[in-house]
């Protein structure tokens, strides 16, 4: 019993939560409450108007009709005539007198005005019709001393259960029709939501369908407004991408000439330190431009990869050997990896950025950074996982989700003094996603852990 009560309570809570978070159900409930309130108000108003209006108009007619019924019963009262009236009309007859004492409905509950009691309040006497004079209107005294009291047979006016069920069914049908209509009215909201999610993911190719495009309603106007907003954002992003690509291309030529001129400087004791420092800065600018160009190309929806069968272990070993300080990187490379078809140039750039990022933040760490590669096999298919971890200070938890954003650098341990402009992890994420893989960042305590998964070649 306890489990049943708990399940019922949980069901009610889920229902209330669904109502609170569903515009459709709230509109249906508002419709039902409004319909119920209007029905009650209308019935009460009609009943009140009918009760107040017909009393005075019907009083003479009722008195004349009761006189006619009393005349039919006769004086002295005839029980057979009274019985015939009761069978023909929905009335009750009570006869009290010296000769005849008879009631047509002995088990019938007497009306409030028929009950004579000093304790009975006036408002109870006025319930039936709201008139204190009903006893005088419906009571007649014959010449021989009999009192005849007429009443209404309430049983004849009781509603049958079928009518109640019919009314309940009609209410449920009305509720269903209201729900379907509201659902149809709000159906464009699903398309607007899906379109907004597409725009947020950078897919501007498919606009939101506008319902009733010729004569749009408020939801159609909202869809058109969101389409306009998406188009404006798309144009802004394209303009930004075009500007960055143009600037990057234009910077490459003077940068190459500056590097060439720097290398032609004489190799003397006075010039060599300045020349080496200038070459390092030019190399950083070159890497920045390369990363910037690659990130913009990969962010384009038309990005194309030059895939080929790749020995990932050999590629990682090659990158580690070419990095300054790469000899200290710990490697845990599992053999017999699944076959992978990768864009070698971009994956080499990915591994270099990850290891370079880990080395920059391991200057005072307890251990050097570590790169591990292992095969994965699960319900979604085979794949290869690459994990790069450093043992540095890490970053605050609230900044983890922003690390893969372009040009973002935390303010704490990872400052410009450690190198980098905030494009490395962003570029790694784009390379992983372009290959159909996943990219995630987490605090390893100590240090930062970056995990990528590439699906195996089918």
Image: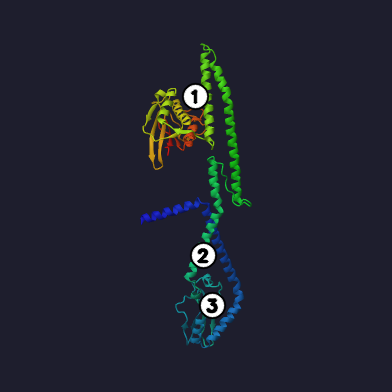
User: Residue 347: x and y, percent?
Assistant: 46, 31
Horizontal relation, residue 319 to residue 193: left or right: left
Q: Secondary structure at mark 3?
A: helix
Residue depicted at 55% across the width and 18% down the height: 260
Q: CA distance from mark 1 to mark 2?
A: 75 Å
Q: Tell me the distance, in whole angstroms, between the alpha carbons under discs 3 and 2.
A: 40 Å
Q: Position of residue 49 (x, y in %)?
A: 60, 69
Which residue corresponds to mark 2? Answer: 170
Which image quarter: residue 378? Answer: top left
Q: State whether residue 238 is above or below residue 271.
A: below
Q: Secondary structure at mark 1?
A: helix
| Residue occupying the point 49% across, 53% down | 19
Name the side, left or right, on which 307 lies relative to 229.
left
Residue 403 seen in the figure: no
- Residue found at the far front of this picture: 308
Residue contact at pointers 3 and 2, CB within 8 angstroms:
no
The residue furthest top is 269
Q: Could you say which disc has been placed on residue 417 in the image?
A: 1
Q: Which of these two is toward me, 34 or 282?
A: 282
Mark-to-mark CA distance, 3 and 1: 104 Å
Foreground residue, 116 or 411? Answer: 411
Q: Which sits earlier in the primary sequence, circle 3 or circle 1?
A: 3
């Amino acid at each position: 019993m306890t489990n049943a009560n708990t399940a019922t309570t949980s069901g009610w809570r889920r229902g209330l939560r669904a109502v609170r978070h569903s515009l459709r159900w709230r509109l249906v409930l508002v419709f039902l409450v409004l319909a119920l309130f209007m029905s009650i108000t209308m019935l009460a108003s009609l009943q009140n108007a009918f009760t107040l209006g017909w009393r005075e108009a019907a009083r003479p007619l009722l008195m004349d009709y009761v006189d006619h019924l009393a005349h039919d019963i006769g004086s002295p009262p005839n029980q057979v005539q009274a019985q015939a009236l009761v069978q023909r009309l929905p009335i009750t007859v009570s006869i009290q007198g010296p000769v005849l004492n008879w009631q047509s409905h002995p088990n019938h509950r007497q009306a409030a005005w028929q009950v004579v009691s000093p304790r009975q309040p006036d408002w109870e006497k006025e319930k039936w019709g709201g008139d204190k004079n009903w006893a005088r209107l419906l009571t007649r005294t014959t010449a021989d001393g009999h009192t005849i009291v007429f009443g209404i047979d309430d049983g004849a006016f009781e509603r049958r259960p079928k009518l109640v069920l019919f009314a309940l069914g009609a209410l449920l049908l009305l509720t269903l029709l209201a729900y379907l209509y509201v659902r149809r009215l709000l159906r464009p909201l699903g398309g607007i939501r899906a379109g907004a999610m597409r725009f947020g993911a950078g897919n501007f190719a498919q606009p939101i369908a506008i319902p009733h495009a010729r004569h749009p309603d408020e939801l159609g106007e909202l869809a058109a407004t969101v389409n306009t907003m998406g188009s404006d954002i798309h144009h802004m992003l394209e303009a930004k991408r075009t500007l960055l690509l143009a600037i990057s291309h234009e910077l490459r030529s003077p940068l190459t000439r500056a590097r060439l001129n720097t290398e032609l400087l004489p190799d003397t004791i006075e010039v060599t330190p300045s020349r080496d420092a200038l070459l390092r800065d030019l190399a950083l600018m070159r890497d920045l431009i390369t990363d910037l160009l690659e990130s913009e190309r990969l962010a384009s929806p038309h990005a194309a990869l030059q895939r080929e069968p790749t020995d990932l272990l050999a590629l990682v070993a090659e990158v580690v050997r070419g990095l300054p300080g790469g000899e200290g990187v710990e490697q845990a490379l599992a053999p017999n990896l699944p076959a992978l078809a990768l864009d070698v140039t971009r994956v080499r750039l990915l591994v270099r950025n990850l290891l370079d990022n880990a080395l920059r933040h391991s200057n005072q760490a307890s251990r050097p950074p570590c790169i591990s590669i292992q095969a994965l096999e699960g319900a979604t298919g085979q794949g290869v996982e690459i994990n790069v971890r450093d043992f540095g200070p890490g970053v605050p938890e609230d900044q983890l989700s922003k690390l893969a954003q372009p040009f973002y650098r935390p303010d704490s341990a990872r400052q410009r003094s450690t190198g980098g402009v905030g494009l490395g992890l962003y570029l790694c994420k784009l390379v992983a996603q372009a290959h159909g893989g996943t990219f995630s960042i987490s605090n390893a305590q100590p240090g930062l852990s970056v995990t990528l998964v590439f699906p195996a070649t089918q």
